[in-house]
Amino acid sequence: MRQRRKEADIIRLSLFVAVFILGVGILCGALFAGSHPIQRSRLPRVDNPYCDIATYVMPDFPEQATSLNDGNGRPVVVIDNSVLADTPAYGQFLMAHECCHHTLGHVRRYYEGLGHLGPQPFYYIRPQLKQMELDADSCAVKLLKSANNRAAVDAARRTMFSFGDQPTGAYYPTGIERAENINRAAAE
């Protein structure tokens, strides 16, 4: 009798542990799918005239825009919905800018850097980030000029000037540096 009771307790404990592990796995999967922009299949796509890269609009995105690869290694651009709604011309600049991060190989270099051990994801490309941003800005201006979208170039210049001598992001150039770079690219 005692042996049967012990076996029943072991079976109950095993079932509890299995259900608990399954629940944690489902929760983790749900959190990942709900928080990862590419896994959220219900994100609306937006036409990006500056590249043939899937571009998604995300409400309340913590950044204005970003370029990354999805879980299958495909290039993706994500832009905050409020940027496109509130400042459409600047949103056009951001879409071109993020396309340029892909075409210039910046995203690939970022993912290659993640293959190394370091204190943070940007650790190995941090020294290059400033130039990467300036290069993506120049590339975006060229794309916008070829599309005859002067309003987007002007919106980018104004937005960058609004940052003044403050960096526009972690390890990024200052607003003035970026605005002057945009002016140079527009003059070419």
Image (cartoon, grey):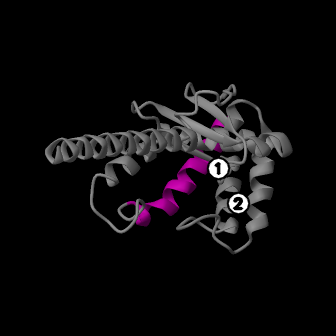
Q: Is residue 126 magenta?
A: yes
**Residue nearest the viewer, comparing 159 with 151:** 159
Tell me which numbered mark, 2 or 1, is placed earlier along the sequence.
2
- Kindly identify the residue that appears in the image at 71 percent across and 37 percent down: 145
Residue range corresponding to the magenta coloring: 125-143
Tell which of 171 and 43 is nearer to you: 43
Indicate the quadrant where residue 48 lies.
Answer: top right
Quarter of the image with the N terminus in it? top left
User: At x 68% / y 50%, what residue is drawn?
Assistant: 64
Q: Residue at x 69, y 75 (%)?
A: 165
Q: What amino acid is found at the position of numbered circle 2 in the picture?
A: Ala
Q: How many marks?
A: 2
Which residue in the rendered view is the most extreme toward the front?
A: 1
x and y percentages locating residue 158 in the rendered image: 80, 57
**Who is closer to the viewer here, 135 or 97?**
97
Residue 100 at what x, y percent from top left? 55, 41
Q: Secondary structure at mark 2?
A: helix
Q: Amino acid at mark 1?
A: Ala
Q: Residue at x 14, y 45 (%)?
A: 3
Residue 4, position as x, y percentages in the image: 18, 41
Looking at this view, is 157 or 8 the one in front?
8
| 118 sits to left or right of 75 | left
Please give the residue where the numbered disc 1 appears in the rendered image: 185
> Which is closer to the viewer, label 2 or label 1?
2
Proximity of marks 2 and 1: CB atoms separated by less than 8 Å:
no
Q: Which residue is mark 2?
A: 179
- Residue 53 lies, in percent from the top left, at 55, 28
Helix, strand or loop: magenta stretch: helix
In this picture, is 158 found above or below 90?
below
Residue density around tag 2, few if under 14, some if 14–19, many if 20 or more, within 10 Å: many
